[in-house]
Structures are given as C-alpha cells and as structure tokens.
Image (cartoon, grey):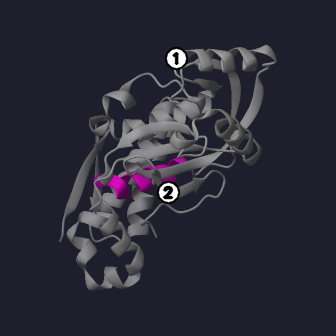
Amino acid sequence: MTGSVRKHLNGDAVPVHVRDPPLAQFRQVRQMLHHLLSGGVRRSEVIGAHLRINCFVAEMLFECDHFHDPLTRSEANGDELRENRSLANDARPLIVTAQLDDASQRYFDGLRKQHFPPERNHLSAHLTMFHALPGDAVVEIRTVLAAAARRDSSVPARICGLRFLGSGVAFNVHSPELERIREAIGSGFKGGLTAQDRQTWRPHITVQNKVSREIAAELLASLQRDFRPWAISIQGIDLWRYDGGPWEFASPFHFGTRETCTGLA
C-alpha cells in the first residue's frame, strides 16, 4: 500500500505514510503533540490528543495493509499479535478500575468481607472508572490505557466521606487528577460509552451491598462515628472482562513504569 492516511486532530490533517516503520509513525504523530503543546492548548485537550494519537497508531499496526507485509510481520511479536486478534473476537464488556495501594486494598477488602453477604461477594474491593467498554475494541482500549499509564508516579487521592446506597455503604473518593485521566480515556470512546459511563463520575469504593436498608443504615452510622478523611494512592489501571457475575482479569497498567504501548515498537 502506498500513499498516506489522513486523520484529523483538532481540525488539522495529519499525514502518516503507511510504509513508515511503526516507530517512525509514532514519532511523527508525537510531533503533532508537541505542536499542540506549543500552541497554548489546554492540558486536558493535550492529554486527550495524546491518547487518541496512540490509539491511531495501534489502528495502523493492526488494520492497515502494511501490517501484512512479510518484512513487517517478521519484526512483530507474532504471539502478541495473535493474542490481540483473539481478544478482539471476545464481545464480553470490558471494565476499567483504578489500582489501589496495597494497604488500602487490604483495608477495603477486609470491610467488604465483613459486611458483604458472602454469597454475593464475588469480587475484591474496587474503584470502577468504566463499567462497560465495548469488548471487541480491546486492542484500542489496551493501547489507550497504556498511554494513560505513561506517567512518572502514582496518582494521589483522598477518602473524603461515606455514601449511603440504600442497600449498602460506600466510601467516596476525591482525586481531580484521576478524574482528568478518566476524562481523557473516555474522550476516545464517546460513541461506545454506555449511558451509565456517560453519567457524571462519582468515584467510590463499595464495602457493603445487597442488604436491607436497616442493616446498611447501621453500618453507615458505625463508620461515620469515627470517620476522618485520609489519603490513598492510585498505583495504576486494571482492565477486566465482565463474565456474567465474576470478573476475569485481563491486563494491568502500572503508573510510573513508562512501558511501551501494546503493539508499538
């Protein structure tokens, strides 16, 4: 395949030559990012553009005719490419959660084990960022999450209050930085977001659910008695498959590792 492919970013046409090697493509679109930075664009727009750029490069690697060139195939990791193709045929919804620091995970797991009905407690404590992303877009989603994780450190957050769920109790989480990351991730999949994921995000960690209103109100009063806000740390992002009840772990994306995006050289 010859010629070029054009994608529009903030109104600008970006030519990408299909026969360029993947790393050259990546550098070319990264130049566009630097152009945006020098043009006084808002930080949230730059983050969103960065994620869309990485998603675009993944599309070039996995969908364009150049991918089938024998020389290109010999440079790629065949096992990983076959795995990505297999994953793309799985239509089960994808769930995205924030990785809690170890101490926080143990604490909330303990509360959940203590107060959740045992027959309903199929999951560890979790902070859900997206409830149901399209399962057949897993290659693009993994690339976007890997790009979002390319940062130098963990994300600060605070447990800022308690929430009554009617049939349970949750802890509210406040983290403007994590909210910006979620917004940037979601900007690349707006057409594929469910109504639930399009709603205003109210991050929380549920420690009790599926109980009577009276039992939930009793736990809420007990936890409120000595509650004081405290700091936690978000260590990365986890990707899961929804399997009709239990979740199947798919991929971790740790903050601070500077790992290369899935499928990129």
Judge the density around disc 1: few (<14), some (14-19), many (≥20) Cα neighbours within 10 Å.
some
Residue 14 part of the magenta segment: no
- Percent position of residue 159, x then y: 70, 26
Say which residue label 2 marks.
249
- Percent position of residue 2, x then y: 18, 70
Q: Secondary structure at mark 1?
A: loop
**Mark sitting earlier along the chain (1/2):** 1
Q: Secondary structure at mark 2?
A: strand
Check contact, mark 1 vs mark 2: CB within 8 A: no
Q: CA distance from mark 1 to mark 2?
A: 29 Å
User: Could you tell whether 24 is left or right of 234 in the image?
Assistant: left
Is 60 in front, or is 257?
257
Which residue is at a point 44% across and 66% down the rendered structure image?
Answer: 264
User: Could you tell whether 159 is left or right of 71 in the image?
Assistant: right
Looking at numbered disc 1 in the image, what kind of residue is underneath it? Gly
Is 243 in front, or is 97?
243
Dominant secondary structure (helix, strand or loop) of the stretch shown in magenta: helix
Q: Which residues are magenta?
A: 136-148
Marking on residue 197: none
Q: Quadrant of the N terminus?
A: bottom left
